[in-house]
């Protein structure tokens, strides 16, 4: 099957298998950009409600640019990969203030936006401006690897170059937006990682992986990500109806999110006395009387390169008010839901068995 026949069959498949999504109804650059940033490393099913909330709250790039950072981070809460939210907000400010609210209309110009890589630039260029740039996301890699029988790892330098070249060759340059959407939808709903619909697939007669019975083996990846374990001990301090939190601003995970005072250890402990000699404990509690209400957890969160295991020490302090020492701030318990927390803390706060109530 030549490239034109591949594209034609793909477009016919799309016509027979429509996949309605809200951003397809608004092919303007802002909407496409918003949807693509949200869907980076995120399944459509998970990202869709976030897109709808962002679109409703910030209907224009100017509205997003003018939003407070904490508000944006809170709206993003639970979606993960928070650098995307920071880039989203920063790019909105740049487009609104430096570009007059207009997104670049070229692939090269789009690449200059923070958080926009080759795939996202190609998606915006084709969907918003109908420019002939082929997209390459995980779904497309999988379709091409199987259909063409490509044995090179998708994450290798040589593999990326080959996939980019073949993606450009197969694309229908006369209908780039329709073609890109078709191949992405095809990979997401038909040529799936597991249990692909090969028996009914219009590509199977010419699909190398199907003919060679290698569908489950492709695509290949060369890099295996090693995850390291980290152990967080959170001090949920309470006095006078308030508790302490701080914003994470250092160059680590969860930048711009909030957390309780935390001691990181080499291993997990359930003995609060082992934490009493730490600098953090001495700074915030010192010689004040305290009582342990309970220990909650462990709660776990798996990140790309790390596994977080966290326990929460719920501590009542014998003092009228908490020490309001920067970077910590004392907030009323009922106001905790105004702040954006990492998933592991959000799981703790939502545990109905805990005493810390958001009321």
Image: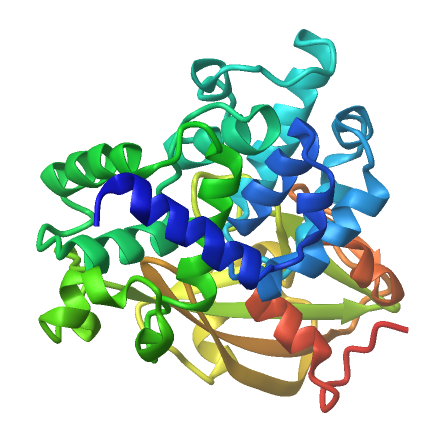
In the displayed structure, 291 sits above or below 258; it is below
In the image: residue 108, left or right of residue 242: left
Q: In the rendering, at what x and y percent does residue 345 appear?
A: 61, 68
Q: In the rendering, at what x and y percent does residue 28 appear?
A: 69, 30
Does residue 279 appear in the picture of this structure? no
Does residue 237 appear in the picture of this structure? yes
**In which quadrant of the rendered view does residue 198 lie?**
bottom left
Q: In the rendering, at what x and y percent does residue 271 appear?
A: 47, 84
Quadrant housing the C terminus: bottom right
**In which quadrant of the rendered view does residue 244 lie?**
bottom right
Q: Residue at x 86, y 60 (%)?
A: 335
Q: In the rendering, at what x and y percent does residue 134 appear?
A: 38, 34
Q: Residue at x 59, y 36 (%)?
A: 86
Q: Residue at x 79, y 24 (%)?
A: 62
In the image: residue 96, left or right of residue 281: right
Residue closest to the eye, 291 or 123: 123
In the picture as drawn, the residue positioned furthest to the bottom comes out as 353
In the displayed structure, 339 sits above or below 316; it is above
Q: Residue at x 80, y 62 (%)?
A: 337
Residue closest to the eye, 319 or 301: 301
């Amino acid at each position: 099957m030549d490239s034109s026949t591949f594209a034609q069959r793909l477009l016919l498949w799309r016509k027979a298998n429509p996949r309605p999504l809200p951003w397809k109804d608004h092919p303007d650059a802002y909407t496409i950009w918003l949807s693509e940033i949200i869907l980076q490393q995120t399944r459509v099913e998970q990202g869709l409600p976030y897109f709808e909330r962002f679109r409703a709250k910030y209907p224009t790039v100017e509205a997003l640019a003018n939003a407070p950072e904490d508000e944006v981070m809170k709206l993003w809460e639970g979606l993960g990969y928070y650098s995307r939210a920071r880039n989203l907000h920063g790019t909105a400010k740049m487009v609104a203030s430096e570009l007059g609210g207009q997104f670049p209309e070229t692939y090269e110009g789009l690449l200059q936006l923070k958080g926009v890589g080759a795939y996202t630039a190609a998606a915006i260029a084709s969907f918003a401006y109908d420019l002939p740039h082929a997209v390459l996301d995980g779904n497309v890699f999988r379709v091409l690897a199987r259909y063409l029988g490509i044995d090179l790892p998708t994450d290798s330098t040589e593999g990326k170059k080959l996939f980019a070249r073949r993606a450009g060759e197969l694309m229908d340059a006369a209908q780039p937006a329709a073609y890109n959407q078709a191949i992405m939808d095809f990979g997401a709903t038909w040529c799936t990682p597991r249990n692909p619909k090969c028996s009914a697939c219009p590509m199977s007669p010419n699909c190398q992986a199907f003919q060679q019975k290698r569908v489950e083996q492709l695509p290949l990846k060369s890099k295996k990500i090693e995850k390291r374990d980290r152990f967080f001990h959170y001090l949920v301090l309470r006095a006078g109806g308030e508790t302490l939190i701080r914003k994470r601003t250092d160059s680590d995970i969860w930048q711009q999110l909030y957390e309780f005072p935390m001691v990181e250890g080499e291993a997990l402990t359930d003995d609060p006395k082992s934490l009493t000699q730490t600098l953090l404990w001495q700074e915030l509690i010192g010689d004040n009387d305290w009582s342990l209400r309970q220990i909650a957890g462990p709660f776990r969160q798996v990140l790309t390169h790390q596994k977080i295991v966290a326990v929460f020490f719920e501590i009542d302090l014998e003092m009228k008010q908490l020490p309001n020492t920067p970077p910590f701030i004392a907030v009323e318990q009922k106001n905790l839901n105004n702040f954006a927390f990492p998933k592991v803390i959000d799981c703790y706060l939502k545990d109905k068995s805990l005493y810390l109530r958001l009321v």
